[in-house]
Image (cartoon, rainbow, N blue to C red):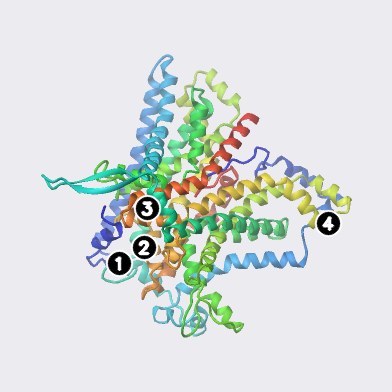
Amino acid sequence: MVPMEMQIAASRVLPTSGLGADFWATQGQNLLMAGIAIVVFIVIVLLIMYGADLIRGRGRDKITLIVLIAPVLLLLGIGLVYPALSTTWLSFNDVSNEADPDTGIYTTVMQFVGLDNYRFAFTDPSTLRTVINTFVWMVLVPLLSTGFGLAYAVFIDRAKGEKVLKSLVFMPMAISLVGASVIWGNIMYDYNQVGEQTGMLNALRSLVGLEPYNFLTDNPWNTFWLIIILVWIQTGFAMVILSAAIKGVPVEMNEAASLDGANAWQRFWSITIPSIRSTIVVVLTTITIMALKVYDIVRTVTQGRDGTDVVANRMYVLSFVEGREPLGAALAVILFVFVIPIVIYNVRSLNKVKENH
Amino acid sequence: MSVTMPPQRPVEDDNPKKGGTRVSRGSGAAKKAKDRLTSPWATAAAMIIAMLWTIPTVALFMTSLVPGSRYRTDAWWTVMADGDLTFGNFNQVLFDSFGDNSTAPPLLEYVFNSIVVTVPAVVFPLVLGMMAAYAFAWIPFRGSSFLFVLIFALQVVPLQLALIPLLKLLGPENLGLAGEFSGVWIAHTIFALPLAVFLLHNFVSHIPREVLEAARVDGASHTQIFFKIIIPLSLPAIASLAIFQFLWVWNDLLVSAVFGSADTYPLTYPISNLAGDYGQYAYLVPPAAFISMIIPLIVFFSLQRYFVRGLLAGSSKG
């Protein structure tokens, strides 16, 4: 497979500066195509649904059921379940291109190699580093986001202007990871060896007389500075969910504790925290999964340099830039193994919810 | 990605305890209990968090106004003190070129790509998810629970696991849709379905049974019930999920990078590339990043209620 970045470079040789008639023609065409796709899609759905409705007798409900669930099952089967199994199989193989001695035509040959790709992942120092880094992300991001989110939710609970204060911290949720990476990488962490410090954090350091610090190359701390970016985004999520849970704690419990002489801090630890414990678990697991899969931040800020690479980014580079797909597949499976406990926990609690329902 | 919420967990809008809270607000003991965790320290900490979470975005905007000639050497506050801030970068990035003048297209092209990628990628999974959600909630059939749990579990599967085979399936040897908008739509639709089915099912299954049974007794078919009762009643849930999916697709980088091409890349792609470059065009990155944030921020602030409701309905995705 030709590395994707090279294909892009090749397709961009013509000067495209400025907006000509071509530009508007292309954009118009694309928008029109999107519009037509939506209309056609909805018309097809309506035709099939009402078509099934024309059937008389007992078959109608059955056909309708199939019409309703078949698209989702097909798409998920072909697009998610089969690919997941196929990736897992690929991770136990090696792929090579071999030329037919007679015709000279190259064919792709898969060869079973057992755990070789996994051995590589855990012995190659730079790849092993990505696994370790991913683990650090998985631990720190949920803890810090939930910690900040909970503290903030408690501090501003019933405060004046609570809604506005919430929006401020929640806002980064609307920003892409790429945007947030630009904000922190280029604006906050920027480091100049000569001249004025243009990054805000280094400018602050200079202001108090400290030497400027290169946040993004100082290994292993640079991983921590990247983690802050995701914490900045996820704290709002934790805060909103936890705030709703805190508001659901029965006020009578707080009253009783208050009459018994418990101060706000004691009530927080002995009433609020136990009451919202299950919500805290939900928030922690949700953010853990998020942290595991994130590759945008590393790709945008350091592109994996200076020991900051994570499994998700390495998987992308191996599979789609370097063309070493079996290794990429092994890394994807490793990511999946990290979430298996969460899958099991989730399915269990779903079944519990269903039983109660 | 999602996690089930415990059933007793309160939801903002229909929290039965909320009324009780309001009633007991007057009594002295309640007032005492309502003493917030207030100390000057707590207030100070909240203020610091609020500032830390706001200043970086403001700083991005200010930095996008720094002219290229001074970007490397002067910070925005110095440039501002000199009165040299300019909107010129926005012009250059949007209409001239984002990066090298001879090779890089203007960012406006990517703005359009983002729109073309996002709108269908929101509509498709919503419609299909709604259909399946109704079937799972209200049409009993064998294997229903098993399939639903399977779909639910799929939410947590890292999409990395599906990328390579799905790209081959959509690629030139098979469907030939990789690199086209249609390929990106299909990929986004597939990855959105588990969450869509789960979230909408939660909502649809709480529609009162009597409403549907009355319609069945009157001889309404599933198709009629779906269009005349389920869809109108589910509009709040549909709105929540639509906003969710909109922000998710608009801000996505991975799916677009893998399934797209130079003809389809959305805003995140060139910004991510140029941002990691730290080269002579670095000064174009902040205005571009700011442009990419405008539409999601407008959507977010105007429809925040629905977005929060979607989050509280029990899921989040990543």
Query: Of discs 4 and 1, which sits in the foreground?
Result: 4
Label 1 vs 3, first from the N-terminus: 1
What residue did someone put label 4 on? A263
Q: Secondary structure at mark 2?
A: helix
Residue at left 31%, top 47%? Answer: A94
For the residues labelled 3 and 2, the Cα–Cα distance comes to 11 Å
Q: Secondary structure at mark 4?
A: loop
Residues at badges 2 and 1 in contact (C-beta under 8 Å)?
A: yes
Q: Residue at x 79, y 47 (%)?
A: A251
Q: Are marks 4 and 2 on the same chain?
A: no
Residue A204 visible in the displayed image: yes
Residue B252 sits in quarter: bottom left
Task: Judge if badges 3 and 4 mark residues of a common chain.
Answer: no
Whole-percent x and y of residue A242? 66, 51
Residue most extreme to the top: A57
Q: Amino acid at mark 4?
A: Asn
Q: Residues within 10 Å of mark 3 (few under 14, many from 20)?
A: many
Furthest residue toward left: A102
**Whole-number angstrom distance, CA of label 1 to CA of label 3:** 18 Å
Label 3 with label 4: CB-CB less than 8 Å: no
Residue B256, disc: 3
| Image side of residue B292 versus residue B22, left or right | left
Q: Is residue B147 left or right of residue A32?
A: right
At mark 3, the secondary structure is helix
Q: Residues within 10 Å of mark 1 (few under 14, many from 20)?
A: many
Query: Mark 3 near mark 2, Cβ–Cβ under 8 Å?
Result: no
Quadrant of the drawing holding the C terminus of chain A: top right
| Residue A304: image location, x then y, percent | 43, 63
Q: CA distance from mark 4 to mark 2?
A: 53 Å
Residue to which mark 2 is pinned? B270
Q: Please state which amino acid type lies under the numbered disc 2.
A: Pro
Observer-nearest of A210 and A275: A210
